[in-house]
Image: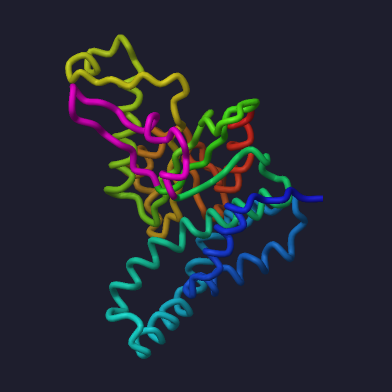
Amino acid sequence: MSYSITKKEAKMLAEIRSKYYMIPVLSRIDRHFEQLPSHRFPDVFNKLYELITDCQNEVIGLIEERKQKGEIKSVEQASRSIVGNIFPFCVIYIFIKNKEVENINSHIFITSKKSEVKGFEDISIIKIGEEDTQKPDCDLIIYSYQANTELEQLDRCIILSLKTSMRERAAQTYKWKLLLEIANDANCQVRQKYNISYNIDKVPLICFVTVNFYNEINNPQQRGMLKFFDRSFLAKELDTQLDFVSPLSDLVDFVNTELSP
């Protein structure tokens, strides 16, 4: 028996399937699901590096076909945009497919659209002085609403920063995480010096997810950044377990634990 996913979740799956450039990778993802018992569906998260790289030539071929038909102007420009979309779409797709078979609790949701999460704006802004603010680098939000209330009120959430490479983008994200730590320390002199304020009861968890296309986690500079997050995940299978980064398949247990009442 499986959950009946919401209309919004069904719509998300349909939108992802409708993207022409998602067809090659989704066919591979679905093939893995067909070969696995439902309790092992989280393992597909760890295949993302392999699946995305394996379908790269097919995706480029589809883009070039669009160029020949006059539907796009530049293969290079379209490729950059599409590469940035494939990774988060894959994570959302695998997440909802896991929820369908009850691996993820029914009250937990995922989205790439901040405007869909009521109350997210309130918990994602750190004030600097009277007028200035800082907001997180946010690719996906995993969240739950408060139980036993008629209105949808945000309970807790996990902010995911997804990057195909690390370098500057990881640094940008972990700096906001450090600022969040400072903002929540009432005795911190840095907070007082810059008049930093952030009065939230339930602070969001900040996590980082990478495909590690360029094998950057073996660089001490890049590896050190991963330790600043509440959890860092790797969408790639590794021969040995690493203490500073978890396989992305662990995201399932992580969200069930952290976002449960």
Q: Quadrant of residue 221?
A: top left
Q: Position of residue 160 (x, y in %)?
A: 45, 43
**190 or 238: nearer the eye?**
190
**Left or right placement of residue 172 versus residue 122 in this view:** left
Seen from this angle, which residue lies furthest right? 1
Residue at figure coordinates x 64%, y 50% from the top left: 6
Q: Position of residue 144 (x, y in %)?
A: 57, 35
**Left or right placement of residue 76 versus residue 116 in this view:** left
How is the structure coloured here?
rainbow
**169 or 95: nearer the eye?**
95
Residue at figure coordinates x 45%, y 74% from the top left: 56
Q: Is residue 149 above or below residue 89?
A: above
Q: Position of residue 230 (x, y in %)?
A: 46, 32
Write the start and end of the magenta stretch as one range. Answer: 113-138
**Left or right placement of residue 14 versus residue 138 in this view:** right
Q: Position of residue 85 (x, y in %)?
A: 42, 62
Quarter in which the C terminus is drawn: top right
| Count of number-bearing discs | 0
